[in-house]
């Protein structure tokens, strides 16, 4: 059986890892290097599923669709931003959202962290940055999907912003670190840690916030466990 066809029976997190294994890589775009994958992608894009029909030879043609379908992130992790803290500022980087797990340990992220200052913006300043606005919208949209049938739980997590989960991040800024810990403890009896990327356990794993909120995440303290602390903080930063 064609190993690429076998992917159709796998879960999203399995697909993201298996594609890289087949390609012999860990966090690389595979559309241009795997002919069966290229054929599959072109079957979809030439059918006009995403608007006008178009052909695809490499991942650059799919860059605008990275937020549309998690499969694109599995096929194009480099192009979609799975292995960078910079643009396109991807927040949903967990395997269940398409990014291969190995991308979180990519040397590119290690290099970017090394140059980051150990400073933190207040909510007003954060909201002027493309990075935070993008994160807030991605996480808010995902939470709306996860919690659509759980109004009580959504009220606990997002009621501070009238049930708008995106606004929770925009209004609180790095204050979401403590607020999220308190809200999840009230909801399930356990605090989830956004500094480490654990928003709702396996249900929602996303980009850790330690590199954006190093002060709130105690990156200057001794023995911090956070891999995404900026390299210029006193705490060690190991990816």
Image (tube, helix red, strand yellow):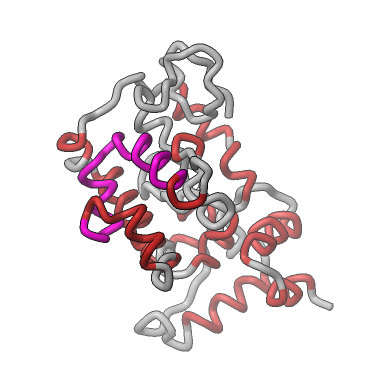
Q: Is residue 132 left or right of residue 31?
A: left
Q: Is residue 237 magenta?
A: no
| Residue in view at x 52 percent, y 20 percent | 224
Q: Is residue 124 left or right of residue 74?
A: left
* Residue that protrudes farthest toward the right in the picture: 1
Residue 19: horizontal and vertical position, in percent?
A: 69, 61
Q: Is residue 176 magenta?
A: yes
Residue 114: horizontal and vertical position, in percent?
A: 46, 22
Task: Look at the image and give the residue range highlighted in magenta.
Answer: 162-185
Q: Nearer the viewer, residue 211 or 154?
A: 154
**Residue 43, picture quadrant:** bottom right
Image quarter in which the C terminus is found: top right
Q: Nearer the viewer, residue 45 or 104?
A: 104
Residue 119: horizontal and vertical position, in percent?
A: 30, 21
Q: Magenta span: helix, strand or loop, mainly?
A: helix
Q: Is residue 201 left or right of residue 125?
A: right
Residue 23: horizontal and vertical position, in percent?
A: 72, 57
């Amino acid at each position: 059986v064609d190993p690429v066809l076998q992917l159709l029976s796998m879960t999203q997190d399995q697909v993201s890892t298996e594609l890289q294994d087949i390609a012999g890589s860990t966090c690389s775009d595979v559309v241009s290097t795997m002919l069966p994958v290229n054929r599959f992608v072109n079957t979809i894009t030439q059918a006009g599923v995403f608007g006008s029909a178009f052909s695809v030879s490499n991942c650059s043609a799919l860059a605008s669709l990275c937020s549309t379908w998690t499969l694109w992130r599995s096929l194009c992790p480099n192009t979609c931003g799975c292995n960078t803290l910079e643009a396109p500022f991807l927040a949903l980087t967990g395997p269940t959202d398409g990014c291969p797990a190995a991308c979180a340990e990519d040397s590119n992220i290690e290099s970017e962290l090394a140059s980051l200052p150990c400073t933190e913006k207040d909510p007003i300043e954060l909201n002027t940055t493309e990075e935070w606005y993008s994160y807030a919208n991605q996480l808010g949209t995902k939470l709306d999907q996860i919690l659509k049938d759980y109004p009580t739980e959504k009220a606990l997590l997002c009621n501070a912003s009238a049930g708008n989960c995106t606004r929770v991040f925009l209004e609180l800024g790095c204050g979401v670190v403590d607020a999220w810990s308190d809200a999840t403890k009230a909801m399930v009896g356990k605090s989830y840690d956004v500094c480490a990327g654990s928003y709702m356990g396996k249900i929602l794993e996303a980009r850790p916030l330690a590199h954006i909120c190093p002060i709130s995440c105690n990156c200057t303290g001794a023995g911090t466990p956070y891999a995404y602390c900026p390299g210029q903080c006193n705490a060690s930063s190991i990816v």
